[in-house]
């Protein structure tokens, strides 16, 4: 699993417009947040095999994404971060 | 605390003898039989509670010399006059009894000591209700800090792809990126655990609120009545049946005898709870007149206690099997990483730095809006 950043244009297009919500920045956070909510509640409301497994999968994704990002930063020397 | 069951099982274990094997479908003994047996074992004492266990075919009967003695116990932290008898629910045989009050206390195990310390530290810092409220306030501060962090995240990540951790620049930027990455990945989880923790700490005030409002109203007509002697009360088994009918879909988890400090002087209070997983923590007390055996009413909890009970598992993480516990522990570790990186950034913030240096690093500061961003990004050296 590799996190590929969205194309450069996606950022500049919205970041130029000050004060507007920057969707691109929030894509990953919203996706991970939605997975977390789904995982928390599918186990709570379902409490059966199928829903439990879905819960484990969806709750582990934010953790896996974190680990992958950390590995990219520390183990892949070519990654240089963003254009700051 | 997350793995407390496993820790107890591993280090302390359960040395109870196994249950008798009976043909499946063996009916349970009448609870009245158990009550009579208990009375015969301790003549002159009162029964306070009858609690069928939900995971074992057993029933616990709690007893005490009298309600008054129990009330007086509250003045002495070391005194506990109540004791219990554990019966096999099917054969009505006595399985176990609590240790007598004058017996030497059970030797404390390291496991018990460590687990007890952790639990009390986490719940109330060994400080009772004030400690619990303080921890609740800390939970509130935690939630606020998560929200303010989210606001800042949007500004810091304007020009960065998600998850980037810059390691080729100032170490402070590495910490900042780390803080942002770990924080945003676990944001919703931390919000949920933080908020439900805050709600949990309010349980005593909320239950107290219920007692002085609804419960007091319900019990008002009976409050002045004397507690009848226990040998003339209606059938306990029949009260269980009545409660089951009064709260359809619920299972009865216990019965308190009339005279208990929170209840009515003339009613059995039966605690019932929902049978489905979501409703399993929603308790509906049922009052059965102990003089006549007639149903007085079923009283679902108010909305704030329902909310409290439903939010409990979301704080504990114990509702989805071992994989969920492990995930809970892993996410805990990530949030600890957020805290550590936050402390590093906060400590570094106090080193003097200028906005110019900030601009050199490429942060566009809005006119007249220097404070939050510069406060965090200052001293990036």
Image (cartoon, coloured by chain):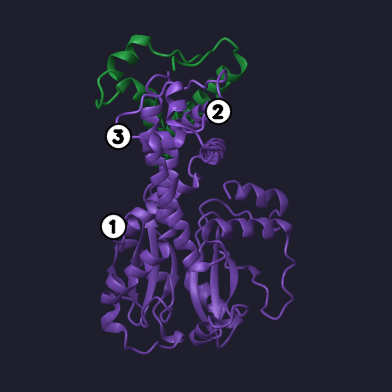
What's the residue at 50%, 56% (across, down)?
B54
Q: Are marks 3 and 2 on the same chain?
A: yes
Q: Are marks 1 and 2 on the same chain?
A: yes
Say few, some or many: other residues with alpha carbon within 10 Å of mark 1 (under 14 / 14 to 19 / 20 or more).
few
Tag 3's secondary structure?
loop
Say few, some or many: other residues with alpha carbon within 10 Å of mark 2 (under 14 / 14 to 19 / 20 or more).
some
Quadrant of res A51: top left
Q: Which residue is mark 1?
A: B303
Q: Nearer the viewer, residue B358 or B279?
A: B358
Q: Which residue is mark 2?
A: B381
In x, y percent, where is residue B253?
44, 62
Q: Which residue is mark 3?
A: B368
Which image quarter holds the C terminus of chain B? top right
Tag 1's secondary structure?
helix
Q: Are marks 3 and 1 on the same chain?
A: yes
User: Chain A's colour?
Assistant: green
Mark yes or no: residue B381 visible: yes
- The chain ID associated with circle 2 is B
Q: CA distance from mark 3 to mark 2?
A: 24 Å
- Circle nearer the N terminus (3, 1): 1
In x, y percent, where is residue B325?
55, 40
What's the residue at 55%, 67% (across, down)?
B60
Tag 2's secondary structure?
loop
């Amino acid at each position: 699993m590799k996190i590929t950043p969205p194309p450069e244009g996606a950022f500049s297009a919205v970041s130029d417009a000050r004060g507007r919500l920057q969707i691109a920045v929030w894509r990953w956070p919203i996706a991970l947040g939605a997975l977390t909510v789904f995982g928390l509640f599918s186990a709570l409301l379902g409490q059966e095999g199928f829903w439990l497994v879905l819960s484990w999968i969806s709750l582990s994704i934010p953790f896996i994404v974190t680990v992958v990002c950390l590995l990219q930063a520390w183990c892949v020397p070519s990654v240089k971060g963003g254009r700051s | 605390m997350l793995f407390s069951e496993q820790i107890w099982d591993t280090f302390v274990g359960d040395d109870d003898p196994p249950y008798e094997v009976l043909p499946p479908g063996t009916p349970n003994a009448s609870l009245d039989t158990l009550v009579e047996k208990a009375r015969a074992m301790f003549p002159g004492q009162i029964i306070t509670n009858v609690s069928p266990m939900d995971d074992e075919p057993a029933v616990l009967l709690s007893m005490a010399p009298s309600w008054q003695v129990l009330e007086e116990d509250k003045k002495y932290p070391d005194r506990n006059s109540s004791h219990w008898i554990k019966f096999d629910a099917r054969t009505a045989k006595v399985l176990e009894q609590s240790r007598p009050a004058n017996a030497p206390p059970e030797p404390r195990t390291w496991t018990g000591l460590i687990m007890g310390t952790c639990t009390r530290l986490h719940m109330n810092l060994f400080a009772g209700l004030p400690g619990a409220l303080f921890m609740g306030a800390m939970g509130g501060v935690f939630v606020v800090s998560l929200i303010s962090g989210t606001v800042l995240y949007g500004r810091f990540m304007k020009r960065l792809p998600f998850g980037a951790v810059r390691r080729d620049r100032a170490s402070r930027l590495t910490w900042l990126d780390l803080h942002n990455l770990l924080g945003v990945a676990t944001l919703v989880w931390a919000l949920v655990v933080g908020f439900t923790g805050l709600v949990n700490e309010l349980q005593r005030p909320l239950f107290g609120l219920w007692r002085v409002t609804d419960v007091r109203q319900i019990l008002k007509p009976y409050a002045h009545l004397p507690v009848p002697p226990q040998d003339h009360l209606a059938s306990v088994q029949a009260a269980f049946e009545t409660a089951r009918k009064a709260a359809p879909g619920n299972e009865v988890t216990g019965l308190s005898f009339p005279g208990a400090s929170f209840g009515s002087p003339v009613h059995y209070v039966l605690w019932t709870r929902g049978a489905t997983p979501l409703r399993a923590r929603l308790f509906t007390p049922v009052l059965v007149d102990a003089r006549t055996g007639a149903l007085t009413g079923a009283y679902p909890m108010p909305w704030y206690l329902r909310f409290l009970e439903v939010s409990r598992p979301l704080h504990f993480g114990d509702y989805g099997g071992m994989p969920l516990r492990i995930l809970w522990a892993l996410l805990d570790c990530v949030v600890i990483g957020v805290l550590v990186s936050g402390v590093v950034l906060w400590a570094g913030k106090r080193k003097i730095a200028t906005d110019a240096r900030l601009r050199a690093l490429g942060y566009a500061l809005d006119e007249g809006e220097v404070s939050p961003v510069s406060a965090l990004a200052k001293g990036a050296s």
